Image: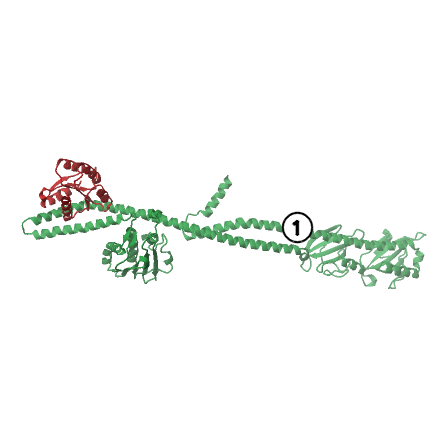
Amino acid sequence: MSSNTITVLLVDDEDEFTSTLGERLEIRGYTAVTASDGEAGIQCIINRDIDIAVLDLMMPGMNGLETLKQIKNIKPTLPVILLTGHGSTKEGMEGMRLGALDYLMKPLDINELIKRITQAVQHK
Amino acid sequence: MFKTRFFKQIIDKLFNTVITSPEHYSRLRRNIIITMLIITILPLTSMIIINHFQYRAHLRNEITNPLITLANKTRHSFELFLKERLSTVRFIAAAYTYDDLKDDQNISRILSFLKMELGGFVDLGVINYQGDLVSYAGPYSLLGKNYSDQSSFQETQLKGQFISNVFMGHRRYPHLIIAVQHLTDSGQSWILRATIDTDQFDGLIRSMGLDPLSDAFLVDSAGVLQTHSKYYGQVLETCPLKLPTGMYGSDIFETKDQLGRDILIAYTAFTSSNYVLVIVKPQSVVLKSWYALKTELLIVFAISVIIIVFAIIRITDTLIKRIRVSDEKRETALTELQHNQKLSSIGRLAAGVAHEINNPLAIINEKAGLMNDILEFSDDFKSKAKFLELTESVITSVDRCRKITHRLLGFAKRIDIQIEPININSVITEVMGFLEREAVYRKIDLRLRLGDNLHLISSDRGQLQQVCLNLLTNAFAAVQDGGIITVKTENRQNNGIQLTISDNGCGIPASIIKHIFDPFFSTKKEKGTGLGLSITYGIIKKLSGTITVQSKEGEGAVFTIVLPQEPQINKEEQNEL
C-alpha cells in the first residue's frame, strides 16, 4: 500500500492547526481531509474514503470520545488516533477502551504521528 | 427559666473558649479544676462546719449538765452541814436553861460532846441580852468580851438565828459563827453562839472529786472567798473572777480567768445563807472529748480534700489531654483537607492553563514545522540556512514549552493518590526540575547523592513529590546564596529506603525544633502558612514512614525520611488521601 493512497481525516476545532498539519502531511505524500467539529468529521467518514482519523478529544459540541463512539458505529474498522491537550491519561485510556488505536499529546511531534499512521495502516 | 439560661451561659463562658492556643488548654484546665473543686469541697466544708457546731453544742450540754448537777448536790451537802449545826445549836439552847449554860463545866462538857459527835465545832459561848459573853468553852480566853456593837449580835437579836460569813476575828483562822437566840423563863433574851471551823468545808469540796485542773470554792455575795481556792486565792481574799452580781439559783457560763485560761464557771447560790458555790473548769478539760472529735473531723476533712484535689487534677489532666489530642487530630485533618483542596484547585488551574496553552502551542509547532518542511523541499536560496536555523529554534522553544506544560499537567494529575512502585530517585529528579533554575540563579550547590539499585517502594508519587518539594523549598529558604544542599538516597533494611535532605543554612533553634511539625507553626511570619512541615509530617505518617530532624542554630538542618516498602494504608485512609 503506497502512501499517496492514504487519506487522513483531521478533526479539531482549531482550523489553523488542522490546515497546517494537513499541509505538512500532504508534503509527506498523504491526502489530508480536515473537519472542524465531530459532526463534520462523521460526514467526511460517510462521504469519503478515509483510511485513518486523527481526533482531538477536546472540542466544542460533540467531543472527541462521543465522535469516536459514532465513528466506531459507522465504520468499526477505521483506525482512530486521539489527540489530547490534557496531561491526564484518563481520557486517553477511555478512548483506547472505546477502540481508539492510540493517543498522542499536543503539541505533536510530526514524526511520531507518521509512525503511528504507518503502523495503523499496515495493521489494517 | 431565666436562671437555667444564666447558668448555661456561665458554663459556656467557662468551658467554650474557642481558641486553639496552648493557653486555651491551661485556662480550660484551670476552669474545670476550680469548678470541680468548688462543687465538691463547698458542700463538704459546709457539712463539716455544721457538724462542728452541732457536735459542739451537743457535747457542751453533755458536759455542762452534770456539772450543774454536781454543784447543786454539793451545795445541798453544804446546806445540810450548816443546817445540822444550826439545829444542834438550837437544840442545845432549847434543852438547857440559861443558868445551866452559864456554868463553865456544863458548857465545856457540851462542847466536848459536840466535837466528838459532829465535829467542826471550835468553841461555844453564851451571850446575855447586854452583849456580854457570860460563859465560854473553847481554846481562847474571851470571857467578858462585849458583842453588843457587832452586826452578828444585832442580827441574831432581830432574826432569832444567824449564820455568818467566814471571817478571821480574834481567832486568826477562818471560821464562821452560828448563833441562836433564846429566852429565859423571865423573858430575857440570851444567845448561844458556836464557832465552826471551815476545814469541814474543804472536806466537802474534796469529796466532789474534781480533776486537778478544776477548782471549786465558796464565795459570799460580795465575792470574798470563803474557802481556799487552788487558783483564785486564800480564804477572805477577793475572788479575781468576775462573777455575776446578785447570784441566785444556779447557772453556767464561759469566761476567761486572770491567768488567761478559757474557763467554764458553774455556780449555785445557797438558799439559807449568803454563800455561793462556784465550780471552775478549764475549757481544755471540759471540751477534751470535743477537741479529740474536732481533730478527727479535721483529719477526715483534710484527707478527703487531698483525695478530691488529687482525683480532680488527675481526671482533668486526662480529660484535657484527650481533648487536646482530638483537637489536634481534627486540626490536622482540617488542615490537610484545606491543603488538599488548595492543591487540587491549583492542580485544576494548572491543568486548565496547560491545556489552553497547548492548543496555540500546537499551532505554532505545526506552522514552524510546515515552514521547515517547505524550506527543506525548496531549492537553496540566500538565507535558507538562516531560516532553517530560525524555524528549528522556534520548534525547540515549542518543545521546551511542551515539556513545561506536560510537567504542570503531570503535577496536577498526581493529586489523586495512586499507590504504585516508585523509585524515589525519579521523584527527586522531577522535583529538581522545578528548582534547578533558582539553584542556578542563587549559585546554590545542589549535591545529589542518589543511591544505585534503590528498592522500589509502593507509595504515592504525587505525595512524595510534595514532600520533597516542601523540604527542598525550606532548604532553599534556609541557605544563603551559594549555600550547599545535599539530597541523599539509600537502601534501608526490610526493603525500605531512606531520604536525607541536608543544608548548611540558618538551622532551627532548639527552642522551636519541637514545634516545627505542629500545624500553623511558622517562623516566616506573613510569608508562611505554617502548614508545609505539618503536611509533610502528615503525608509521611500516612505513607507509614518516619520523618526526623536534627539541627543546630547556624549549622543547618538535616531532615531524614524513612519509608517502608509497603505502606500500611487501610481503605478508608486511602480514600481520605
Q: Nearer the viewer, residue B341 or A85?
A: A85
Q: Nearer the viewer, residue B168 or A100?
A: A100
Q: Residue under label 1, please give it.
A: B57
Left or right: residue B86 versus residue B44 is: right
Q: Position of residue B302 (x, y in %)?
A: 57, 55
| Quarter residue B487 falls in | bottom left
Residue at image coords 9%, 43%:
A4
The green-tinted chain is B
| Quarter residue A117 falls in | top left
Q: Chain of mark 1?
A: B
Under mark 1, the amino acid is: Ala
Badge 1 crowding class, 10 Å Cα cut-off, few under 14, some 14 to 19, many 20 or more, is: few
Residue B496 appears in the figure:
no
Residue B397 appears in the figure:
yes
Q: Nearer the viewer, residue B450 or B421?
A: B421
What colour scheme does the image use? by chain
* Chain A tint in image: red
Left or right: residue B455 versus residue B288 is: left
| Quarter residue B102 falls in | bottom right
Residue at image coords 52%, 53%:
B309
